[in-house]
Image (cartoon, rainbow, N blue to C red):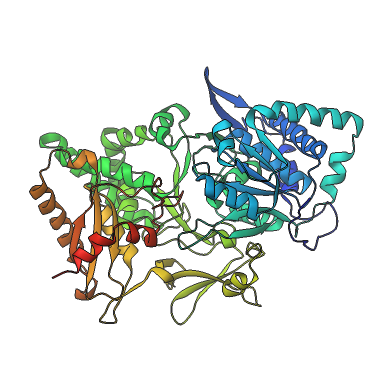
Amino acid sequence: MAKAPPQPSARAGEGRTIGRLWRDGVAAGRTNAAYLVEGTDGWTEISWDEAARTVDELANGLLALGVRKGDAVGILAQTSLEWALFDFALGLIGAVGAAVYANSSPKDARYVLEHSDAVAVLVENEEQRAKIAGAQIPHVLTFADLAGLRERGRELAAKQPNALAEAEAAVGEEDLFTFIYTSGTTGPPKGCMIRHRNYYEMAGCVDHVDSFAFSDDTMLLYLPLAHNFGRLMHLLGAHVGYTIAFCPDPLRIAEVLPVVRPTILPSVPRLYEKVHTALQAQFDLTHGVKRRLLDFALRAGRQASEVRQQGRPLRPGLALRHRLADRLVYRKVKNRLGGRLRLGVSGGAPLAKEIGELFHALDILIIEGWGLTECTTAASVNRPNRFRFGSVGPALPNFEVRATEDGELLIRSETVFAGYYKDEEATREVLDDDGWLRSGDVGSIDEDGFIHITDRKKDILVTAGGKNVAPQNLENALKTAPLVSQALVVGDQRPYVAALITVDPEQSQDLGPEELTERIQAIVDEVNADLSRFEQIKRFTILPRDFSADEDEVTPTLKLKRRIVAEHFADEIEALYSA
């Protein structure tokens, strides 16, 4: 069988492994549910004991199948209990998970499995199996086959009761735990080699971030587990002990929220952007007494937010107004998110400062973090009791972050990956001999240690006049307007900055072409008002459709694939610079 490259191991069975993380979590004697799963009869609780039994049986079943330490095993499925428990089973025996996004094309799915040298793959159903038809994979299992795999595991455990323990004992902290493939915004995805200790240390960071997660929390998890953000939230569940409710379909989030009533909601910014758009649209339609009440609540909320950002308690008068505003306004918004939300977490892409500020004015805290797959998810995060909107927070404990002369942020920590699989040259480009990882992000660190991201280094536009422009800042500013759905700012080696804009169908359905253009122009003018002349958007065009994953224009975490969008709308871009 093909193997991942050999890695130096710590003493057998000891150290910071995912197997140890799982075993410690199961042994903690927790009485809350480990997971919540939706079925035809509603939501079902899965206990820690039940989950532990399933993981053991799956791990033994994999051993019976012939899977061994170092073998790559793919997972092609939506976020689900099966995905999570299979992942822990792989970790126990030292197999290397090779995750594939559920919405991947057949070409991309086969690429990951073939590039990782997978000897087996778990697919959700026959539809996903069809994507990998023709791939030379010795073992292909569907979710329907898992009961049989567990049965094989029970049989092996009866015949060889020490088989699993021996496999676990052979796994060390420097061994590979998983391949996570980058989104491929500029080319084929690269396989990040993540060690056991990388994710173990990443999960352990939460122990030093006050009030981030508690064992009695309920997390609604819809993020793809093939992405490092969703993967960390799933692993943290075992480490911290909170309950994870799986939502495989992101389009059902609004439906599921009031049923699950989560206390933590990790998300990419797009979800919060859509809620923000809906709130702004509703606010614009509010008049009379209700409008005055709304204005009162927002004033109180913004004042309270400013005080809380300074780490100070609310004065009695402000506290009273805030409680009144909560009863009259805030709770109605909170109920849309389930009514119990304690903390929103945003990652994967930048969140506009204005969005965080509005939510906090409505007594809903969304903290933003920053990192990348190559450092096993996060390098910094705002804290629930120490945050600054517009920043990605201070560096996490035991992380070093510094900026180079040209503003690129470098990261050094125990979570930095082992390199790109089969690509030493690309590894050397991002990882130096002293362990510093080049993030590719341009930013700054203020005097209080808060990190501010300007843009991706490769995305910075340099106009024909030699001026540097950060497109993400402009795009985020445009998207705070309810009418704007997506935006791509262009202008590299061009005489001025321009933008491709898509509009929200609900917000634009009653607008004629002329009125729509006037409304977008007003939004652009408002964004331009605070910018230097060279940064201002001089021209724009309104596209007939949104940027789409089906057209390969956005990544699974909804980041724009700029090169592909520019190729698809090359004629529209050229028209922006025509006479």
* Residue at (57% x, 23% y) in the render: 44
Counting labels gives 0
x then y, percent, for residue 464: 26, 79
Do we see residue 362 in this rendering? no
x then y, percent, for residue 409: 49, 72
x then y, percent, for residue 304: 31, 50
Return the residue found at the far front. 134
Who is closer to the viewer here, 422 or 461?
422
Who is closer to the viewer here, 7 or 139?
139
Who is closer to the viewer here, 202 or 84?
84
Return the residue found at the far top. 41
Q: In the image, is 520 to the left or to the right of 55?
A: left
* Residue at (25% x, 50% y) in the render: 502
x then y, percent, for residue 410: 53, 72
For the C terminus, the quadrant is bottom left
The answer to whether residue 462 is above or below residue 249 is below
* Residue at (69% x, 44% y) in the render: 137
The answer to whether residue 455 is above or below residue 466 is above
Do we see residue 291 in this rendering? yes
Q: In the image, is 289 to the left or to the right of 459?
A: left
Which picture quadrant has residue 27? Answer: top right
The answer to whether residue 224 is above or below residue 259 is below
